[in-house]
Every structure is written in structure tokens, then in C-alpha cells.
Image (cartoon, rainbow, N blue to C red):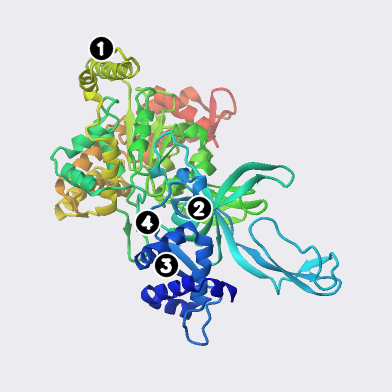
Amino acid sequence: MALADQNTDLIDAFDEFYRNYYRDEIGELAQGYPTEEKSLYIDWQDLYRFDPDLADDFRSQPGQLIEYAEEALRLYDLPVDVSLGQAHVRVRNLPESTPIREIRADHRGTLIAVQGIVRKATDVRPKVTNAAFECQRCGTLTRIPQAAGDFQEPHECQGCERQGPFRVNFDQSEFVDAQKIRVQESPEGLRGGETPQSIDLNIEDDICGKVTAGDHVAAVGILQLDQKGNDREKSPMFDVYMEGISVEIEDEQFEEMDISDEDKKRIVELSNEPDIYEKIVGSIAPSIYGYDDEKLAMALQLFSGVTKHLPDGSRIRGDLHMLLIGDPGTGKSQLLSYIQNIAPRSVYTSGKGSSSAGLTAAAVQDDFGEGQQWSLEAGALVLADKGIAAIDELDKMQADDRSAMHEALEQQSVSISKAGINATLKSRCSLLGAANPKYGRFDEFEPIGEQIDLEPALVSRFDLIFTVTDQPDAEKDAELADHILTTNYAGEISTHREHNATSDFTEADVASATETVDPTIDPELLRKYIAHSKRSCFPTMTDEAKQAIRDFYVDMRAKGEDADSAVPVTARKLEALVRLAEASARVRLSDTVEIEDADRVIATIRSSLEDVGVDPETGEFDADVVETGTSKTQRDRIQNIKGIIADIETEYDEGAPIDVVVERAEEVGIDESKAYHEIDKLKTQGELYEPKTDHLRTT
């Protein structure tokens, strides 16, 4: 065995390493090989403890040393009837991972680790590693090993020395499973404005088929180069890819966020301050004046509730969904982009430029795999897994595209059935949406519920809905003007000082001007605060908090007990209260949800309900305004008008005259303008038609 003869020392070193560190693991591998286990996973840190020089050589010359490591595994002293002939040695847990955007030519041929999210993955396909060609003339077999690149065929037969023809003998050839995946930088490692970069990994044998689009992975592999161009015109530029050695799915949240002990100390100090909620509200988009309720709700959404897994296998989501509906120029988009920058993991997209495939997942046919294969490409809601998806201009999206979000919001998964691919991807994210009212601006004379130009099925999935109206108010307008002018002045003198060497403004002037628009908590520290809280804090409810939330829900429901009353809230709001209360406890890094958390979120829910959940005609809470888009009063009025038309049309041959219908409606207490409005609406929906001008019939 030439390899063993030449490098006995290295093989002996690996053999000793296995005996010292991996005796039990090799025993388990031998028992399960080759049906259950085909690889021995070794920790690079163990190799470094055993022999630092050998570990460093493994990183700089991985191709050769993996061969010696696998040879040592084959020669390992095992029972006579056990052979590990094709077993792999896979390294994991390198001391640090290389950011994908920092991979350079110097890394060529070395062992590197990358972290990110799987953007695409091909199907697992067999790949030939040693092809056996059979001469059609004399039947001689010629074996040719197949390396990366083009398929190699023999030039002439080793038996009759003719140039073929040949055919591949599949029984005598050696095949291995192969898959190609594309790993993209994780959103938490990026800042606003940076385009995420990616790298392709070729993986083989037992690690194939383990990951799918949307999984967060840590991969170790050897960096290789692939020349661009074709056989005729070869380019001096090369693409980089990795020969994957190990790929592991990471469940830990925010694995790329480095939180030091000093950061943790500052986070704990902050969490103990009595005004922590005010500080966090003050740290969210300080350049936008007001909106304290909305900013508190956004802060709670950033921290999110606790996801529960029940013994029967079902799951209750902890993520909060929030919708902002408001007049133009009220700062909705700015709030969204600020949240996107401050969230540890986030994806931002605008409704006009998003399709259902871009939000969920697309089946793409391209040359990513070998030949034109179909592969899945993860969309925004999948990439935002365990983070926040901020979607602006929700109302500008096509209704069909919006419907793709229903499953992602409630079940927190994305099911795909396209191009013969049936898959379910994870989408455990919070959604922060922004939209304009139906007419671009709120009409104060029409119910707000009717002005939300989104499907009730989608709107009802949001835990909190806030309306942002732009009403003239002398006092508020003066305060807003002062705030905007101060913000702009702070920016002006800061820029003036930066670009003008003879500037009269001192650093103290700049600090004084920016004081009002400075966030109370540094944005980078706040990102770490949120990540640390979600990673380590899982609060439980105290009896007092449970009782307060229960009492609020039962009291609200009691208002709808009369036969003629509307249903004020549904059980969805109760779940929203629990999630919000858990998020409120996480802000303090508390392990228990106290009565103060319950009171805080009850006030937030009440504020949200007063915005959209009130029937404008009766002033009472009505869940149907949001859940179905039609209040109970309106629904009763529609039924009355349809009943009146059905009665009158039997009296007239040409249908019920509109003026008679309106007159009869006024007799039962329906205002003339409202009667005309409902008739127009029913005609639009196709429930009424006009057989003759100003005459109506029901369909």
C-alpha cells in the first residue's frame, strides 16, 4: 500500500489520536457501518489538543491529510469481520468561521468554515467516481477515475488498442450520492444596504439530503477554484466553491452575534433600570416624533413571546405579527426600515416589488445543478426564519401574492408544490407590515374597517393593528415641526463640521444638537440585548398575570352576550395577550410574567382595538370589523335591505323600484345615504342587479 509506505508516521499519528480520543466513536461506527453510519466526525479542537502541528497542517493541506486520516481509520484494529473500507473522516468545529464575503485567493486549498442560510439545494443525484468502460469490439474493461470537471472517457482500448466504441458498464463502475447547495450570509451578519453574498458547496455521500432551503447551517470544506468560460475561450477569472466535508444544521438563534461578557454585564444593568421600557421606546426610530404605543408594540415584537411545543407534537407560535395602516407621510416606512436594522435577524421587502414566490419560495430551473434541474430557492419569509420580516406597501401587492402569506403567518411554515417538488419550509418569523388605506388617506366619515384594503383572512392573523392618521392639531403640529427642524439642524451642523475644515461648530455643538435625536440605547447594544434575551430568557406566567389577562378577556366577551350584540374579541386576541406579556417580561430579562406585564399589554391591546376594532355606528368593540371586514351593524343592515328588496320585487313586475326600497328602509331606521351605499355595494358584489333602470332584483 504505497500511501501507507510513504507516510507511515502521519498514519501512525492519526491511529494514536483515534485511540486516545475516538475509541468509542469508532466502535459505534463499526457497528452501524455502512447502513446507519458511514462517517467518523472528529472535532478539530481535539486534534489541536493532541498535536497542534498536525491540526495546523490539516487546515493548510486538508486534501492530503484527509486521505491519511481515512487510511488510518481503515487500518484501525477492529474485529476481523468488520471493515471500514469506504468510511469518511469529517472534521467539524473549526476555531473560527470565515465570513463568506471575506473569502480570498489565499484560502485556496485550505480548510475553512462558513456559516449562513441555505438559499438553494439540488436533489440528491448519483455521481460516478470510477467509470468502467467496456469495449464493444473485444469486451475489455478500462477503468478511469472521474475527478471534478468534465466526464473522462478512454482514448483507446487496453485490449485491442482501438478507439472504441465504448459503453459504460454500470455494474462495474463506482457511484456516490452527490448534492450541491448554495449558502448565503445570514441576515444577522449584515447591515442595511449590504447585498448578501453566497458560496456553493459540493457535498457527497452520507451528508447529502440532510439540509433544505431555509436551514441555517455551519459548513466545513476545502476551498476550490473553477475556471470561467468554455473550452474555446477560457477566462483568467475563477469562481470559488467548496468541497464540503461536514454540514450541520444550527438551531441556535443568532449564531453570528458575538456577545462578550462586557456586553452581557451592560445588558443586565440595563434590564434592572426602572425606566427600561421608556428607554427602549426612545431607542426605536428617535428621529420620528411620537407613536409611543406603536413603538412599544414594535419593541415587544422584537423580543417576541415564547414558542411552545406541546406533548402531542403541536406547536403554539410565540412570534407577534403587527400591521401599521396609515396616511402617507406619517413615517411608517421609516419605522419599518429602523426595525429591520435593529432586529438581530431581519428581511425587508416592499409589496410592489414582491411576488408570492419571492415571499415564500420559488422553484427555479437553471444550471445551478448539473444540467437544467429544478431547485427550490428560499424567499423572504423563509430567509427571515427566527427573525422579523418587514413588508412595506402591503396594499400595493396583488391579492393572489398576499394570500401566500396566510400559512406563513399562522402555521409558520411555507408549503410548496411546484415543478414536481413538494416541500414544507420553516418560516418561524414575526411579520411587521405597513399599508395605506383604500383611498390613499383615511376618510373620517367612513368606518376604518372598510378602509383597510386587505383581505379579512389576512388582517385577522395580525395580533396588533394600529392606524396612523394625519389630523391637523395646532399643538401637536408645532411639536412635530420643532422635532423635524431640530433633527435636520443636527444633521446639517454635523455634515458641515465633517466636510468643512474651517467650520465654526465645535464637537460640543454637534453633541448638543444631536442629543434630542440620539437613541437612548446604542443600536448595536440593543441588537445584542434582543438576541441575548431571546437566546436565554423563557418566562412563565404568575397566577396574578394569568388572572388579569383572563379577567380582561372574559369582561370583553361579556359585552357580546346579548343576542343583538357584536362579538367584541375572539380567542386569537387572548393568545396575542399571552405572547405580548411574555415579550414584556423578556424586556426585563425576567423569568416570570408579572401583573405589571399583563397590565402593560392589556393597555396596548386596548389601544389597538380602539383604532380598528370599534363599530363606528355603535361605538362598541366588534371583532367582526377586523375578522370579516364587516361590522355586525352593517351585516344586519345588509340583511334588512336584501329582505326589503325580496318583499317588494314580488309586488312589481319589473323589480323593486329603488325609491320604494329606500323609503321602506327609512321606516325600519336605515338612513337614506346608508341605504344607497349598501345597495351600490350589493350591486358591485353581484347580489343585486337592475332588470330596468332604478329597479332592483336579488340574484
Q: CA distance from mark 4 to mark 3?
A: 13 Å
Tell me the residue that label 2 is attached to.
Answer: 213
Give, as a three-letter code, the residue at label 2: Ala
Q: Position of residue 570 (x, y in %)?
A: 31, 46
Mark 3 or mark 2: name the one nearer the start of the chain. 3
Q: CA distance from mark 3 to mark 2?
A: 26 Å
- Farthest residue toward the bottom? 80
The vertical placement of 692 against 236, above or below, is above
Mark 3–mark 2 CB contact (< 8 Å) = no
Q: CA distance from mark 1 to mark 2?
A: 55 Å
Answer with left or right where residue 692 lies relative to residue 287: right
Mark 1 or mark 4: name the one nearer the start of the chain. 4
Q: Position of residue 586 (x, y in %)?
A: 23, 48
Q: Which mark is residue 406?
A: none
Q: Position of residue 349 (x, y in %)?
A: 45, 36
Q: Which mark is residue 42?
A: 3
Tell me the residue that label 4 is attached to.
Answer: 95
Give, as a three-letter code, the residue at label 1: Asp
Q: Is residue 469 visible?
A: yes
Residue at disc 1, secondary structure: loop
